[in-house]
């Protein structure tokens, strides 16, 4: 059973971690979680991002969600935002594509151009 | 939408857009009353009676910037509940927030399944780490009552300056929700 005491351990570990890398977020991932995105599988896409981040212990990656963006025909849509770079929008995402984006783009810095639907802004 | 949890995810997103600070989600499974009740309560901007009425219309959206004026979230949820003899109610007060209550008859053969409640809650919590979420799951039948409470405020206090989005914290929340769902028989509903 998970208890609040478990959080104390996490906190101690996390504080060490954050000290080492001065606590900055390197990449922000935004999953479109509007009605059409959800209907097309955005929840599973977001869940896969969370799982990958937990298993790979990517402490400098932040996953968040946003509402409808008007890209209904290519949902689920995901933005990858990095400081000082053009933002990349991936479309028609699936859990398998998420794993590839994590391995290629987020970890190794190579954009998965096959899935890109928009760049910039 | 294939299940109630996906609708729930969608509805929580409405609360977020209404600038809620705290979202309360209750899932109440009452076997005695043959009722599965979902309540989402927020402290967002709220709606006046006109907007509240309009929100149930599929050709209405509160998003001004939108070219296509379609908002299907609420109408679809309402339709899916009413289709099986359930009920859909919304109450709101400008400046105070909105409460949405949706009832489904538990044993109706065409009722949509509750679905993956854990992933819906986990996504909402991690996707909006600055919001407070209060989750209450309750199961009741003739002989017992099982309940589960989850409150991000308590977690935040324990974590101090460590964000909810930290990998180990995500795992912790995922596991806690899993245990709560098991405990209250909310799986395969």
Image: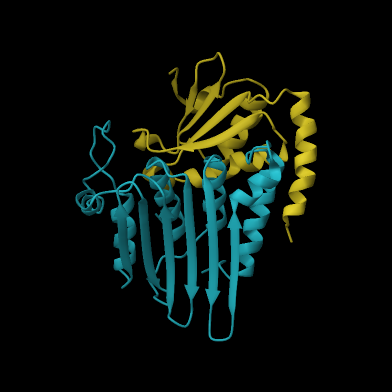
Chain colours: A yellow, B cyan
* Residue A65 point in image, percent of width and height: 49, 38
Give the camera-side residue of B5 and B93: B93
Q: Residue furthest bottom?
A: B142
* Residue B85 point in image, percent of width and height: 31, 73
Quarter of the view holding residue A17: top right
Q: Is residue B133 above or below residue A109?
A: below
For residue B133, side relative to residue B84 (left or right): right
* Residue B61 point in image, percent of width and height: 26, 42
Q: Is residue B32 above or below residue A110?
A: below
Q: For residue B3, say whether it is visible.
A: no
Quarter of the view holding residue B81: bottom left
Q: Residue at x 57, y 49 (%)?
A: B122
Q: Residue furthest top?
A: A84
Please count the marks in the image.
0
Quarter of the view holding residue A109: top right
Give the camera-side residue of A4 and B137: A4
Give the camera-side residue of B84 and B126: B126
For residue B148, side relative to residue B6 (left or right): right
Q: Is residue B46 above or below residue B135?
A: above
- Quadrant (top left, top right, bottom left, bottom right) of the N terminus of chain B: bottom left
Q: Is residue B98 above or below residue A68?
A: below
Give the camera-side residue of A90 and B86: B86
For residue A32, side relative to residue B98 (left or right): right
Q: For residue B181, say whether it is visible.
A: yes
Q: Residue at x 27, y 30 (%)?
A: B65
């Amino acid at each position: 059973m998970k208890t609040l005491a478990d959080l104390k351990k996490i906190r101690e570990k996390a504080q060490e971690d954050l000290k080492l890398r001065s606590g900055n977020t390197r990449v922000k991932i935004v999953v479109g979680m509007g009605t059409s995105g959800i209907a097309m599988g955005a929840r599973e896409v977001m869940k896969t991002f969370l799982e990958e981040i937990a298993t790979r212990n990517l402490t400098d990656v932040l996953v968040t969600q946003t509402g409808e963006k008007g890209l209904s025909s290519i949902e689920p849509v995901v933005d990858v935002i990095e400081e000082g770079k053009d933002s990349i929008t991936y479309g028609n995402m699936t859990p398998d594509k998420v794993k590839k984006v994590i391995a290629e783009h987020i970890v190794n810095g190579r954009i998965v151009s096959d899935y890109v639907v928009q760049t910039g802004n | 939408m294939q299940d109630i949890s996906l609708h729930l995810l969608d509805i929580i997103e409405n609360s977020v857009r209404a600038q809620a600070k705290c979202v309360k989600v209750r899932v109440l499974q009452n076997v005695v009353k043959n009722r599965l009740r979902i309540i989402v309560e927020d402290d967002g901007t709220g709606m006046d009676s006109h907007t509240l009425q309009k929100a149930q219309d599929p050709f209405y959206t509160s998003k001004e910037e939108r070219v296509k004026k379609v908002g299907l979230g609420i109408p679809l949820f309402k339709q899916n509940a009413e289709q099986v003899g359930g009920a859909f109610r919304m109450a709101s007060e400008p400046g105070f927030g909105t409460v949405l209550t949706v009832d489904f008859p538990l044993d109706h053969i065409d009722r949509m399944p509750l679905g993956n409640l854990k992933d819906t809650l986990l996504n909402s919590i991690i996707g909006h780490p600055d919001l407070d979420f209060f989750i209450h799951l309750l199961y009741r039948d003739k002989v017992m009552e099982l309940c589960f409470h989850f409150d991000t405020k308590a977690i935040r206090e324990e974590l101090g300056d460590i964000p909810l989005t930290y990998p180990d914290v995500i795992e912790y929340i995922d596991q806690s929700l899993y245990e709560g769902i098991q405990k209250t028989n909310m799986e395969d509903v």
